[in-house]
Amino acid sequence: MTEYVERLPVPELAGIVRTVWVQRTGDAPYAQRHLPTGGVELHFPIGGRPRLLGPLTAARIEVVPAHTTLVGVRYRPGAAPPLPVALDELVDQHVDLADDRLADAVATAGSPERALAVLQAHLPRSPVDPLVGAAVEALMPWRPVDIDALAGHLALSPSQLRRRCLRAVGVSPKVLQRTLRFQGFLALAQAGLRSAAGLAADAGYADQAHLNRECLRLTGLTPRGLLGGSVEECACGHDHSASYLPFLRDSFKNGRPGVPSLAR
């Protein structure tokens, strides 16, 4: 049995970090399915070597050893720790990091919760390209936008926008748009906000078949397989509200009892 506790980052990191978490595996190894999110992740196994999960274009399976505790950070698209290469060179890769100082601080923190606090207090970060940040905001779910029109709005050519996005996000604007739309679908499903009949349309897909194709492409599973048997609500038992809140429209965030407020 794997325990997973996810929460919002400290306020100082809210502009660059989407969510942070603690994960503990039980007596058996755990097959972790990492999904494309549009951002990169830092994984710090307590007592082990930290790793960076680069931008994903498809699911990546990692077998986490038994009796492992790790703390993790998921950056927002366009934000990342300082790296020696552009993010498009790290697409679909899981690479070791050489930050022994921070790894030691996490390992000696005394508890997973304290380790997460230490990690956030000393999290390495790089400036966000403001034009890429504006592009990411425009490409969030619920905001259909033409990529060429977006480039013109930012006073860039489509090729300039593509180059800047590849360098700062790791994928093209079109791939990022599709990834964020899928994150919007997961947000609705994890929040249990929509019926199966309306979920695909509310997430921005042409129809259920379109959603099924994209889910298979990005995760290797059908929506039902990914969510544990139901398209209407995730059955994994974990609280993902810290992660899905940014991907819900305001009408969903504020209009249904039991859905946490953004003021958390």
Image (cartoon, rainbow, N blue to C red):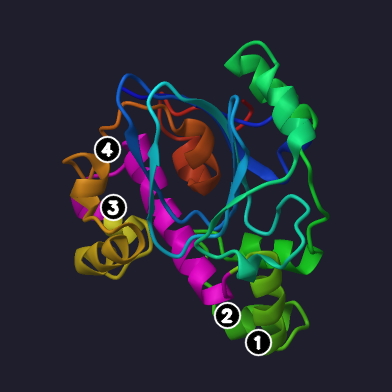
- Confirm whether the magenta stretch covers residue 118: no
Labels 4 and 3: the sequence-earlier one:
3
Earlier in the chain: of badge 3 and badge 2, it is 2
Q: Quadrant of the C terminus?
A: top right
Please give the residue where the numbered disc 3 appears in the rendered image.
199
Answer whether residue 64 is visible to the viewer in this image: yes
Q: Which mark is residue 233?
A: 4
Residue underneath mark 2: 147
Question: Residue pushed farthest left?
Answer: 229
Element class at badge 4: loop
Give the image location of residue 93, x and y in percent: 53, 59
- Magenta span of residues: 171-198
Q: Secondary structure at mark 2?
A: helix
Badges 3 and 2: C-beta atoms under 8 Å apart?
Answer: no
| Separation (CA) of disc 3 from disc 2 | 24 Å
Q: Tag 3: residue type?
A: Leu
Q: Residues within 10 Å of mark 3 (few under 14, many from 20)?
A: many
Q: Are marks 1 and 4 in contact (CB under 8 Å)?
A: no
Which mark is first along the chain, 1 or 3? Answer: 1
> Quick check: marks 1 and 2 in contact, CB under 8 Å?
yes
Disc 1 marks which amino acid? Pro
For the point 75% across and 32% down, the residue is 102
- Measured from the top left, where is residue 174 in percent x and y? 51, 75
Q: Residue at x 29, y 70 (%)?
A: 206
Label 4 with label 2: CB-CB less than 8 Å: no
Which numbered marker is on residue 158?
1
**Left or right side of 253 for 26:** left
| Left or right: where 116 falls relative to 94 | right
Q: Nearer the viewer, residue 52 or 6?
A: 52
